[in-house]
Amino acid sequence: MSDYFVHPTSVVDDDVEIGEGTKIWHFSHIQSGARIGEKCSLGQNVNVSNHVTIGNGVKIQNNVSVYEGVELGDYVFCGPSCVFTNDLTPRAKYPKGSAGYKKTVVEEGASIGANATVVCGHRVGRWALIGAGAVVAVDVPAHALMLGVPARQKGWVCECGELLEHWDAGSAEATDEVCTCPACGRRYRKSEDGLQEVENQ
């Protein structure tokens, strides 16, 4: 007996790894070589392409295709109908194959809103928050709030999702100044790749 759940309408190809406690719902397709971690939830009509790696605790909502070249870290959230790509210059007549795909990495805890698009070849940092309908065509710092078309940084967010109003959006220079989340009390300072949590002394 499997230690994960796959709805009878879904298709799981050979050479797939699915972690304990993961649930895959209606009309989804998991392609050969995919690796899915523990306690994930994949909604209706989700496609996970060949050789995709998905971490633990990931939630992928309805109508999302995770294409080859995309890597999702632990606890990533993919909102309904969000879009990933893997080719910057696609042509139906001149397919490049997997050798031409650009890698996209979504790091731990990042959330991608409904109908947002992440253009391939970029990295979405830890615990970043991509707003609904945004189009991301740049690397995203850890804990950054990204909104609009094209997406621009509009602020910083805590691991819990609360907006941090201490710093101006886009102000990315490292500093010893510490900001405390008003909701959960986590403390942050700026680092070279966004925000970094400060351990309580």
Image (cartoon, rainbow, N blue to C red):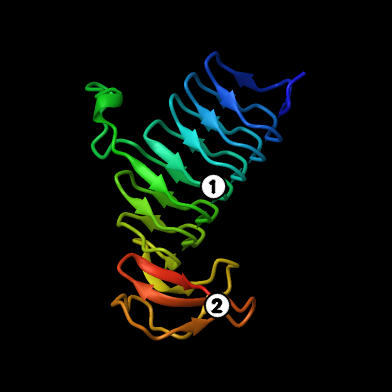
At which x and y percent is residue 42? 63, 37
Q: Is residue 50 above or below residue 59?
A: above
The residue positioned farthest toward the right in the image shown: 1
Q: Is residue 96 above or below residue 90?
A: above
Q: How many marks?
A: 2
In terms of depth relative to the viewer, which is nearer, 1 or 96? 1
Question: Circle 2: is it few (<14), some (14-19), or many (20+) Cα within 10 Å?
Answer: few
Q: In this view, does 70 lie to the left or right of 103?
A: right
Residue 69, located in which quarter of the rendered image? top left
Identify the disc placed on residue 162: none
**Residue drawn where x is 33% and y is 64% of the image:** 193
At which x and y percent is residue 112? 50, 54
Which of labels 2 and 1 is toward the front? 2
Q: In this view, does 167 lie above or below 146?
A: below
Q: Is mark 2 on a helix, strand or loop?
A: loop
In terms of depth relative to the viewer, which is nearer, 163 or 1? 1
- Determine which residue is flagged by label 1: 74
Q: In which quarter of the image is the C terminus?
A: bottom right
Identify the disc placed on residue 200: 2
Q: Quadrant of the N terminus?
A: top right
At which x and y percent is residue 104? 36, 43
**Residue drawn where x is 52% and y is 16% of the image:** 15
